[in-house]
Amino acid sequence: MKKILLLLMLPAALCLPAYSQTTFYTVDQLIETALANSADLAEKEAAWKASSYRVKEAISRSAPTVDFESNLSYITNPDTLTVEAGALGEMVLPGPLVISMPEEDVVFEMTGNTYYDFKLVLDQPIFTWGKILNSIKAAKEGAGAALEDRGKTEDQIKTEILINSHVLHYLKEIELALSKQNELVKRLEGIASDSLSNGMILRTEYLEVENSLRESDLAIRKISQQIKSTTLNLTYLTGIELSPVMIRTEPLETGDRESWENLFGKALSENRDLAMFRHKVQADEYKKKIRKGEFYFKPDLAFHMELGYSGSLFPFIQEGWEDDDKGNLTLSLAIRSPLGDGGAMYFAGEAAEYDEQASRASYEAAMEQIEQFIRQSLMDMELNEINIDYYRERLLTDERIIEQKEKEWLSGYGDEKEYLKSQIDMYARQVSLFREMISLGTTGFQLDHITGSVKQ
């Protein structure tokens, strides 16, 4: 019988490890999974790679271009040359004979029915008023902006994972504190119910306790919804289905607290948005130079070479093609200068000027917003830390009060209701402490993101 039970339990035992392999996720694992599954990051990665190839494309425009052109024709009525009879005069022979030259019309075929035209063309830019060089520089700035945009998306994903994990940790702590508080309120409601039955309290006093219990139940439901919502955020970010119990949370540390000057200095050098704006400003400046170089009466110079063959014989295949002397090599200095286009070049130049001004204004506005955010964040975090210190000190006092109320109740001098209320107040302050921790950590991680100090 024991052997049969063991055989029946064996498949179930073998199945157990399969359910425990991917049950829990640490914060680092969540970040790694989110980065691997992020469609936004994949889009930014592709955009950066595309911009890198645009740089190579711009560089290649300074190299010579080589083109091959061909024209293969069959002519049903080729050109001919006709020499009419007597066109060359007369020839006098001995005697009375006189012969016309030629004696009859002679027709010469100028070409055959086939005609082949092959051409190898090489163009090399020589002088373009900096358009090619500035195009290369603008493309490099565009690639730099795309790389910063990719980094910004990656940092944003990390920051959101850190914030949601941090929030989830303290929401669980709040849920635990509220659950313990709820048990105490239930006990208090039971005492009030007995007191009401015995006529020791008024109906209004009981209803007040009953309302406190309802408020406690409602608070637990709200915090449960917040936990689910935060877990859904992590599910969306990582691309995997998560539940609160699957996420291993712990208190997370933000970056070291520094002065406003140091944080703003970090933001100026490390902030991804500012770096993107700097690249955009430079790119727009180079584009403006391109427009200035592409203006009226500014000629571009280029070396132009053509190596061609035109004839009725296919080269290298039909015999005698080289005797036709139909090959030709042409070397040219090509000059191109725009003279007029209805003002399009002028308007394009003006637009480029204002594009650069707009980019610089956006950069200045971004710096002002970052400065304001850092100042506000430091003030908020300072207030959070003051409140945290207060609640921690107050909780120490609450512990002493609870001990005193417990002794009074057990010795018969005190009331159990007072003992219960002191514990309820303590858990309420615990909840307030945890909410301050949530606010402090959230602001801290956002500040790390702004200053380019996101966990790598």
Image: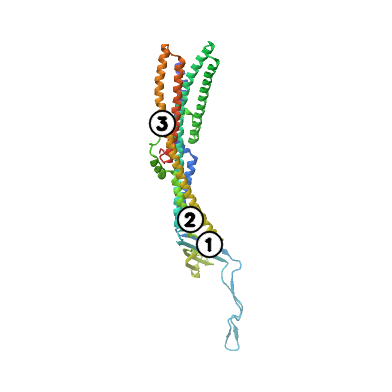
Q: Which mark's residue is nearer the viewer, 2 or 1?
A: 2
Q: CA distance from mark 3 to mark 1?
A: 83 Å
**Mark 3, residue position:** 386
| x and y, in percent, of residue 126 in the image | 44, 62
- Amino acid at dot 2: Lys
| x and y, in percent, of residue 13 in the image | 45, 23
Q: CA distance from mark 2 to mark 1?
A: 39 Å
Quarter residue 263 falls in: top left
| x and y, in percent, of residue 42 in the image | 48, 42
Colour pattern of the rendering: rainbow
Q: Residue at x 41, y 24 (%)?
A: 395
Q: Which mark's residue is nearer the viewer, 3 or 1?
A: 3
Badge 1 local density, few (<14 within 10 Å), some, or many (20+)?
Answer: few
Can I make out residue 384 in this image?
A: yes
Can I make out residue 23 in this image?
A: no
- Amino acid at dot 1: Ser
Front position in the image: 350 or 146: 350
Quarter residue 93 falls in: bottom right
Front position in the image: 29 or 250: 250
Residue 70 numbered mark, or none:
1
**Mark 2, residue position:** 288
- Is 329 located above or below residue 189 in the figure? below
Contact? badges 2 and 3 (CB < 8 Å): no
| x and y, in percent, of residue 438 in the image | 45, 31
Contact? badges 3 and 1 (CB < 8 Å): no
- Amino acid at dot 3: Ile
Q: Secondary structure at mark 2?
A: helix
Front position in the image: 412 or 277: 412
Q: Which mark's residue is nearer the viewer, 2 or 3?
A: 3
